[in-house]
Amino acid sequence: MVDQIKVFDVLDRKIEKLLDRLETLDRENDKLKADLAAARRAEKDAADSRGTVEKLKADLAVARRSEKDAADSKGVVERLEREQEVVRERLEKLVATLEAADRKG
């Protein structure tokens, strides 16, 4: 009878240890699940960030092309203004010559 009590006590202690270990493993499992969910969210955020970075790079390229186009347009406008000034000066000389010829004639 005493041997049976000892066996049951040993079994009871082993069962309690196993239950404690089960609770510990269950808590660790919950923590790992939470860590996995956080890692998946971080991975999704990183993918979203990569998409945003690519969009920003594309926007920057468009802005740089627009800036270059604006600079080219400015150069064209400046050239046209210089040409217009030359034409104006020639017209003024022509008018002055015609007026002088008209006064002589």
Image (cartoon, rainbow, N blue to C red):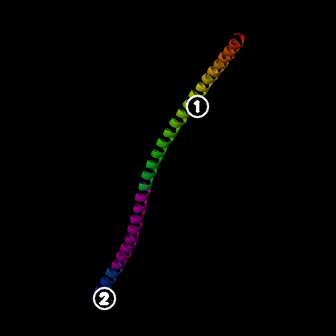
Identify residue type, mark 1.
Answer: Lys
Q: Position of residue 90 (x, y in %)?
A: 64, 17
In depth, the one of 62 and 85 nearer the eye is 85
Q: Which residues are magenta?
A: 14-43
Residue 81 vertical position relative to residue 12 in the rendered view, above or below? above
Q: Quadrant of residue 41?
A: bottom left
Q: Position of residue 76 (x, y in %)?
A: 56, 27
Instruction: Name the secondary structure under disc 1.
Output: helix
Relative side of 49 to 75, left or right: left
Relative side of 93 to 7, left or right: right
Q: Residue at x 55, y 36 (%)?
A: 67
Q: Position of residue 22 (x, y in %)?
A: 36, 73
Which residue is disc 1 drawn over?
Answer: 74
Pick the quarter of the image with the C terminus: top right
Which residue is disc 2 drawn over?
Answer: 2
Mark closest to the chain's N terminus, 1 or 2:
2
Residue farthest along the bottom direction in this orientation: 1
Residue farthest along the front direction in this orientation: 105
Q: Quadrant of residue 34?
A: bottom left
Identify residue type, mark 2.
Answer: Val
In depth, the one of 29 and 69 nearer the eye is 69
Q: Of circles 1 and 2, which is in front? A: 1
Q: Is residue 89 magenta?
A: no
